[in-house]
Amino acid sequence: MFCARRRGVLVTGPRLIPSGVRIARHYNWVVNADENIGLFDLDGSLADFNGQLLADLEMLRSPEEERVTDLYAAEGVSHIKARMDLIKRKPGWWANLPLLEKGKRVLEAARDLEFDCRVLTKGPRTNAQAWKEKLDWSFANLGPLDVTITFDKGSVYGKFLYDDFPEYCYRWLAHRPRGLVIMPVERISRQYEHEQILQWDGTNFDQVKAALVACREREPHEPMVIPR
Ligand SMILES: [Mg+2]
């Protein structure tokens, strides 16, 4: 076993090679219950994917067409889907998405509470350029945070996840019975009621901060209880 101090906390791990201590410090491969990692989604959470895509679709709309307001429904309309794919393949599109103030507010609160905030975003399977631009966007808007781009967010560790997409939230919680999800929503809905999900509609910031404090302070194996 080796031991090392990180942020004043004794951490231990198996000695894999003679220089294990130096390697572990350099690559930070030891994960402990006292590492307060907070994960932040990009699209629809910190980056205004929906707003920019709707605005770009509106520019391409002919006068006879109805305005697109529901991107999920639009995915099922072949010619609108083709437009969306073209828009998303325009060089620089992902790198220049506007920053969402609502998400930035939560990120700053988590940083103030000394969470180790990291980006966790899904990469499109057929658009490798988007992966690079997501990294560019993160560094330009958030500074040098750790960034994970993945097909499966459920495989990534954190104490909380900030994500707007319910399917990814439930997937991530499936293996984290004590995890916290903060889900940005337009308005709080009973549809997403879950004891570990806190919906954040821009009006309940005190509750968001209280949940972050509870998340940080809870001991390992204690349940995550959201102050209601
Ligand atoms: Mg999202």
Image (tube, rainbow, N blue to C red):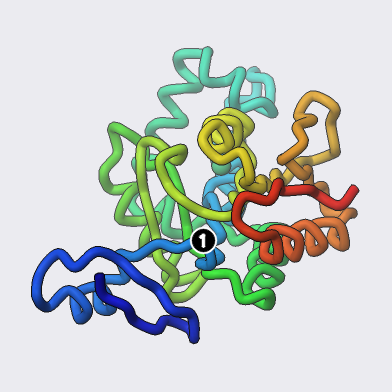
Q: Position of residue 145 (x, y in %)?
A: 44, 70
Q: Position of residue 37 (x, y in %)?
A: 52, 62
Amino acid type at circle 1 is Ala
Give the image quadrant in which the ligand numbered 1 is located: top right
Q: Position of residue 8 (x, y in %)?
A: 49, 86
Question: Residue 186 appears in which quarter of the rendering?
Answer: top right
* Residue at 46% over, 22% down: 81
* Residue at 38% over, 54% down: 148
207 relative to 25 in the view: left or right:
right
Question: Residue 55 appears in which quarter of the rendering?
Answer: top right
* Residue at 56% over, 65% down: 36
What quarter of the picture does the N terminus occupy?
bottom left
Note whether residue 60 is visible: no
Q: How many marks?
A: 1
44 relative to 187 in the view: left or right:
left
Residue 30 vertical placement versus 68 (above, below): below
Question: Residue 74 appears in which quarter of the rendering?
Answer: top right
**Viewer-proximal residue among 97 and 40:** 40
Identify the secondary structure beneath mark 1.
loop
Q: Position of residue 87 (x, y in %)?
A: 43, 39
* Residue at 9% over, 75% down: 18
Q: Pointer 1: what residue?
A: 33
Note whether residue 23 is visible: yes
**Viewer-proximal residue among 214 and 4:** 4
22 relative to 51 in the view: left or right:
left
Label 1: few (<14), some (14–19) or many (≥20) C-alpha neighbours in 10 Å: few
94 relative to 168 in the view: left or right:
left
